[in-house]
Image (cartoon, grey):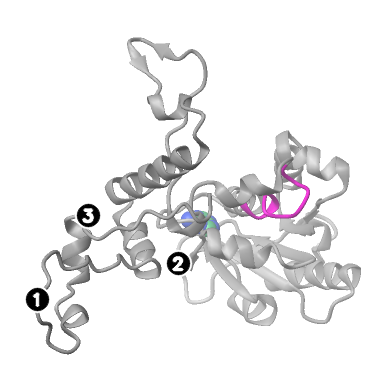
């Protein structure tokens, strides 16, 4: 997977991504980073100007279309694809999540456009951008940090980047659940003991406990994710305790899913993906 980043601050990108796990993956050849300075494509050979005033007035400067478009053309030629995927990082975009990271990780090449100043001339965006993506509802000074956040999240899903391919799947957000609590040595610290089940050596019980903890933690900390998990893994209706004659479809007619979520009822704990 090759990441191409159109930016006014290539050294910021290169330095950050060449450290830690992304840096190791780059040196092993699983991913590559190509931070390109938009300024190098300015037609203003004297000052390498890339911004100008906004038509119609308004505070601040706007990044001009021409240097960005020429930078894009040079990357397009390098990639050798007619319509490469171009992500414009902007607070106006769709909010980035794990599912988007997984979709982007399927590409061979991704181009990120990092904006600055008051934004970018709309015409070049219309011409080259395929995806408008935000990292959250707040405004940063530029697109470099959001681009690096996304590149980090996408990189770790590229096969080979993490030492153990499995760990990418079992961590937080797999199946819309947060990760269960984890413990290392010593067995007791500041009077707090490691949950005994984790010392039992019974792997099935440990898996069940972890799934249960994931569900409880998600319900408490991220009710929005919990709702998604429940929709995809609906609780099984409880079997009636006493035998009595049933009306047709009574079981499903009377099942109130949100009520049973509230009461934690009818949950079948399956350790399927652990
Ligand atoms: N540029 C400035 N703020 C941003 C954000 N929240 N997400 C993506 N790009 C941005």
At a point 18% along the width and 58% down the height, the residue shown is 262
At a point 79% along the width and 43% down the height, the residue shown is 25
Q: Secondary structure at mark 2?
A: loop
Measuring from the top left, give residue 219's x and y in whole percent: 29, 51
At a point 30% along the width and 67% down the height, the residue shown is 236
Q: Is residue 85 above or below residue 166?
A: below
Q: Is residue 161 above or below residue 107?
A: above
| Other residues around mark 2 within 10 Å, as few (<14) / some (14–19) / many (≥20) | few
Residue tagged 2: 58
Furthest residue toward bottom: 248
Furthest residue toward top: 190
Give the magenta range: 153-162
At a point 83% along the width and 50% down the height, the residue shown is 30
Based on the picture, tell me whether residue 26 belongs to the magenta stretch.
no
Question: Is ligand 1 closer than 8 angstroms to the Cβ of mark 2?
Answer: no
Magenta stretch mostly in which secondary structure? loop
Q: First in sequence: mark 2 or mark 3?
A: 2
* 18 lies left or right of 257: right
Report the disc number at residue 81: none
For the question of whether residue 48 can be seen, the reply is no
Measuring from the top left, give residue 16's x and y in whole percent: 70, 38
Q: Secondary structure at mark 1?
A: loop
Residue tagged 3: 264
């Amino acid at each position: 997977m090759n990441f191409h980043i159109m930016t006014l601050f290539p050294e910021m990108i290169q330095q950050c991504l060449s450290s830690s796990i992304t840096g190791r993956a780059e040196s092993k050849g699983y991913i590559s980073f190509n931070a390109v300075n938009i300024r190098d494509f300015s037609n203003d050979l004297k000052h390498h100007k890339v911004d100008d005033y906004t038509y119609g007035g308004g505070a601040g400067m706007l990044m001009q279309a021409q240097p960005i478009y020429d930078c894009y053309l040079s990357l397009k030629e390098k990639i050798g694809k007619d319509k490469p995927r171009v992500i414009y990082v902007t607070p106006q975009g769709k909010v980035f999540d794990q599912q988007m990271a997984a979709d982007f990780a399927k590409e061979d090449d991704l181009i990120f456009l990092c904006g600055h100043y008051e934004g970018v001339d709309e015409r070049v965006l219309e011409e080259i951008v395929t995806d408008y993506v935000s990292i959250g509802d707040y405004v940063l000074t530029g697109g470099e940090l959001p681009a690096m956040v996304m590149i980090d999240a996408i990189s770790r899903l590229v096969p080979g980047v993490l030492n153990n391919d499995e760990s990418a799947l079992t961590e937080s957000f797999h199946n819309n659940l947060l990760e269960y609590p984890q413990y290392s040595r010593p067995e007791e610290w500041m009077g707090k003991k490691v949950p005994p089940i984790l010392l039992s050596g019974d792997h099935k019980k440990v898996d069940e406990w972890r799934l249960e903890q994931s569900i409880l933690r998600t319900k408490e900390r991220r009710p929005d994710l919990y709702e998604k998990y429940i929709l995809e893994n609906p609780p099984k209706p409880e079997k009636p305790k006493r035998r009595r004659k049933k009306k047709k479809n009574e079981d499903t007619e009377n099942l109130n899913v949100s009520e049973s979520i509230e009461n934690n009822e009818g949950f079948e704990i399956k350790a399927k993906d652990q």
